[in-house]
Image (spheres, rainbow, N blue to C red):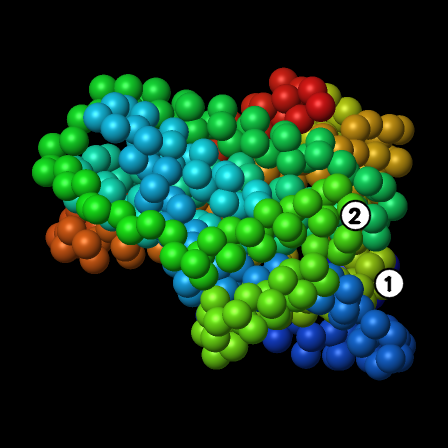
């Protein structure tokens, strides 16, 4: 019992140091894993085994290929071409941004990179056309999370890996579909509240003459299609396929090794895999069982999905969804279900991931922060306006946690 409590304190310390000092929590976690493991009598070799090399290779491969797609502007040009499908129907733009973000996240890059690309793009639209920046930011951020749980996207890969390790089994497309439906519903609430259906462009809308895809961009698009077919139809590992296709793209000069290396999400890889090292020690010392028991003690079957979702959302305000919240909360699901005498594991995993992602719209998270920074830079807002935008983005994050909590209470995550 004593070591279990201490392990939780170490996990909390890693999160606090990462948040307070701005240090990658993955680095901190690996260091603390050594101290905690030594206290618990765990051998160094066992601590090192906590580094999930399979997950690292898979996520690195995906990041590598889409670093190339980002460098040669394939994703950016695709988004720009799609957005003009709205024509003069300005009220459709938020939904088009949402769907583009979901599509791009789902085909491989995942939630975080697409949040970065689309939040800046959406804020450029808001600034140039005089559109509501909160609505456009929400469309980009919620859209990116809506599509980010497919089996070929990094967050979807991580979710399945964690579920497998916890003994939950194959998630299939259930959690991915729950993510899309819940995110779309919450975005629709925001759209109605902010009266997106009455939105008009007050700025001068200048349609830039978009270039055609060049041969390198067509090669990249072909590579993405081949990757999707190889993974979803033939069952190949997505990371290994991406390494092969990425290498071919480099051979044919679709990008450069230097640019690809620079654009790889190294920070995310270190964060996810580093926290996993600490989590493996916490699990061995009984920390996750302790969290499971604590949550189960305040739950009844009717409220279990809602409570675990809200808990995950609150934790996500101060830490990474993929790096901290998912590795911490998903392993608690089997213990909670056992204490409750049964339940829906898919619904609980869905609540954890989706509520935590929605909380990431906060301006103190990467997605919301990028949106705020991009808009205030483009428009040169005053300090008062910046504080107002900050407050409203936080309202979106808070509202998202409340909405997902109610959705879980109504059984929304159990439909699929």
The answer to whether 330 appears left or right of 323 in the picture is right
- Residue 167: x, y in percent? 87, 46
Identify the mark at residue 235; answer none if there is no mark.
2
Per the image, label 1 sits on a secondary structure element best described as: helix
* Residue tagged 1: 284
Q: Callout 1 environment at 10 Å: few (<14), some (14 to 19), or many (20+)?
A: some
- Residue 170: image quadrant is top right
Residue 241 visible in this rendered orientation of the protein? yes
Residue 402: x and y in percent read 51, 30
Q: Which mark is residue 204?
A: none
Q: Nearer the viewer, residue 273 or 95?
A: 95
| Residue 181 x %, y % | 56, 26
Marks 2/1: CA distance? 32 Å
Looking at the image, residue 115 lies above or below residue 263: above
> Who's the residue at 68% across and 45% down the image?
229
Dot 2 falls on a residue whose secondary structure is loop
Q: Label 2: few (<14), some or many (≥20) within 10 Å? A: few
| Residue 312 drawn at (x, y percent) | 61, 44
First in residue order: circle 2 vs circle 1? 2
Q: Is residue 71 left or right of residue 284?
A: left
């Amino acid at each position: 019992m004593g070591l279990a409590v201490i392990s939780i304190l170490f996990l909390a310390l890693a999160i606090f140091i990462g948040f307070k000092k701005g240090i990658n929590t993955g680095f901190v976690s690996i260091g603390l894993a050594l101290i905690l493991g030594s206290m618990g009598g765990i051998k160094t070799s066992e601590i090192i085994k906590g580094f999930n090399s399979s997950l690292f290779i898979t996520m690195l491969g995906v990041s590598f290929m889409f670093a190339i797609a980002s460098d040669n502007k394939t994703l950016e040009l695709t988004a720009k071409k799609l957005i003009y499908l709205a024509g003069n129907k300005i009220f459709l733009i938020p939904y088009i941004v949402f769907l583009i973000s979901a599509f791009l996240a789902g085909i491989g890059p995942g939630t975080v990179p697409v949040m970065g690309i689309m939040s800046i793009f959406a804020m450029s639209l808001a600034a140039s056309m005089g559109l509501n920046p909160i609505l456009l930011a929400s469309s980009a951020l919620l859209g990116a999370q809506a599509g980010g749980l497919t089996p070929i996207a990094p967050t979807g890969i991580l979710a399945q890996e964690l579920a497998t390790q916890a003994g939950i089994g194959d998630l299939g497309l259930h959690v991915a579909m729950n993510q899309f439906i819940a995110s779309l519903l919450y975005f629709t609430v925001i759209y109605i509240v902010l009266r997106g259906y009455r939105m008009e462009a007050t700025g001068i809308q200048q349609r830039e003459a978009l270039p055609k895809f060049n041969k390198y961009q067509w090669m990249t698009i072909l590579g993405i299609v081949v990757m999707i077919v190889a993974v979803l139809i033939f069952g190949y590992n997505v990371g290994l396929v991406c390494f092969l296709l990425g290498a071919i793209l480099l051979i044919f000069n679709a990008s450069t090794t230097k640019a690809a290396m620079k654009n790889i999400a190294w920070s995310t890889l270190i964060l996810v895999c580093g926290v996993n090292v600490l989590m493996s020690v916490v699990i061995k010392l009984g920390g996750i069982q302790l969290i499971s028991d604590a949550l189960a003690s305040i739950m009844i079957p009717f409220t279990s999905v809602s409570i675990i979702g809200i808990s995950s959302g609150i934790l996500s305000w101060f830490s990474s969804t993929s790096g901290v919240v998912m590795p911490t909360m998903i392993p608690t699901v089997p213990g909670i279900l056992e204490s409750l005498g049964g339940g829906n594991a898919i619904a609980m995993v869905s609540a954890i991931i989706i509520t935590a992602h929605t909380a990431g719209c906060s301006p103190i998270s990467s997605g919301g922060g990028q949106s705020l920074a991009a808009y205030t830079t483009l428009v040169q807002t005053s300090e008062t306006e910046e504080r107002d935008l900050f407050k409203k983005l936080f309202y979106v994050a808070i509202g998202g946690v409340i909405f997902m909590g109610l959705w879980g209470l109504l059984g929304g995550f159990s439909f699929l």
